[in-house]
Image (spheres, grey):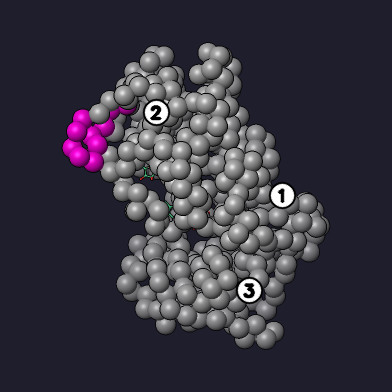
Amino acid sequence: MRTDVAIIGAGPAGLLLAHLLAQDGIESIVVEARTKEYVAARIRAGILESASVDLLRSAGLGAGIEAEGDEHRGIYLQWPHERHHLDFVDLVGRSVWVYGQTQVQADLAAASDAAGRAVYYGASDAALHDLDSDRPYVTFTDSSGAAQRIDALAVAGCDGSFGPSRAAMPADRRESWERIYPFSWLGILADVAPSTDELIYAWHPDGFALHSMRSASVSRLYLQVPNGTDVNDWPDDQIWDALATRLGHGQNGWTLNSGPITEKSVLPMRSFVQSPMRYGRLFLAGDAAHTVPPTGAKGLNLAIADVALLAPALGALVHKNDAALAEAYSDTALRRVWRCEHFSWWMTSMLHTSGDPFDAQLQLSQLRWVTASAAGAAGLAENYAGLPIGF
Ligand SMILES: Cc1cc2nc3c(=O)[nH]c(=O)nc-3n(C[C@H](O)[C@H](O)[C@H](O)COP(=O)(O)OP(=O)(O)OC[C@H]3O[C@@H](n4cnc5c(N)ncnc54)[C@H](O)[C@@H]3O)c2cc1C
């Protein structure tokens, strides 16, 4: 097969890139290891920054957000006996939207199907070749077992943390940084109306807790747990008890509604960046190049921001053989990546308990400052609601 851009991975980064390229008249073929159903069902992120919403709307992908998304002005930050609201709209003039990654993925898949774009689901053995030439190619085995080859002008590695693209860059041409945190999140999805109008981020001596939501009838909640936690060691009642304690059930008349848990999983917390995000005609986007702990709600938004920069860069390369934007892509994207890496680490460090009493006092001091000082609150709001794409 021959195309303009071979895309590896049909997650949000891969499908959105294919969509933006098509709007610019550029052909692509997407190769995805998993089945379409598996990709559609993955429960992951749930918050869209205003810049992500603007981009999806301008790309004609805003109908689902209008119909089912829920615009939030801010978040609550709390510690025992105190809950404070940060109003991002008042602080920095921007809001965020609760709209699940499953919904973003469904919108992208529907647009891809409607346009009849080529997506090879269930592909195995994807491998990248001749990336330092101007005729790179990708090989893979399709779901029927047939060997396939895609010749392209560029390859986009949108294959997440465990795909082959990141490692296809020569070892002596890449650098990486990693931080493994000593805790994980136990996340649940529950068929119960949210007990709050906006997300609650709770510091507690027992560990962090987060009350998020997916819709008017579905809640998403998280508990800080030790690394290596087996989800089967947490019966549903114990999860609700821990959430009630950490989120402050009964304080100032607030109650946590519980309900049937429909999904539960443990998510390890990691920060990772690989640089550069480009080698020859290979361009990395989204989790293929970086990972953030989910405390800052940045993973999905960073994938969208990368692709928003990459699509015009590939457009100039394909249409005009102009490599200026392509050459600038990695440096431009990494500026925002590192800002989000820092913010995600900062939120994580402020809210997760380590057991060290000195750390706990520092965290409480920081929380008091962020909620009491207009400057502190604006800094959090500016980063959480999202900096402009290309920042
Ligand atoms: C388990 C998990 C839970 C998360 N939870 C949250 C959360 O609660 N809140 C939050 O803000 N963020 C969360 N995130 C982060 C957020 O979901 C990601 O940042 C986002 O999915 C990035 O999109 P992406 O398209 O770059 O990567 P992905 O969504 O990972 O998509 C990459 C795609 O590449 C495919 N692929 C991999 N290898 C190959 C191969 N060899 N050949 C072909 N295709 C391949 C994968 O199957 C996948 O479909 C979570 C991430 C994970 C992994």
Whether residue 352 is visible: yes
Residue 131, by quadrant, is top left
Most extreme residue toward the left is 145
**Viewport quadrant of the N terminus:** top left
Residue 356, by quadrant, is bottom right
Give the image location of residue 348, x and y in percent.
56, 56
**Viewport quadrant of the C terminus:** top right
Give the image location of residue 294, x and y in percent.
52, 55
Residue 350, by quadrant, is bottom right
Tell me the residue that label 2 is attached to: 6
Kindly report which numbered mark, 3 or 1, lies closer to the viewer in this rendering. Answer: 3
What residue lies at 54% left-to-right and 23% top-to-bottom? 315
Instruction: Kindly state the secondary structure of the residue where label 3 is placed.
Output: loop
Kindly report which numbered mark, 2 or 3, lies closer to the viewer in this rendering. Answer: 2
Tell me the residue that label 3 is attached to: 196
Magenta-highlighted residues:
138-147
Is ligand 1 within 8 Å of the beta carbon of the residue shown at mark 2? no
Would you say residue 144 sits in the magenta stretch? yes
Please tell me which of labels 3 and 1 falls first in the chain: 3
What residue lies at 35% left-to-right and 69% top-to-bottom? 231
Tell me the residue that label 1 is attached to: 382
Would you say residue 121 sits in the magenta stretch? no
Amino acid type, mark 1? Glu
Amino acid type, mark 3? Thr
What residue lies at 34% left-to-right and 53% top-to-bottom? 38
In the picture shown, does residue 243 fall above or below 13? Answer: below
- Label 2, label 3: how many angstroms apart (C-alpha)? 43 Å
Instruction: Kindly state the secondary structure of the residue where label 1 is placed.
Output: helix
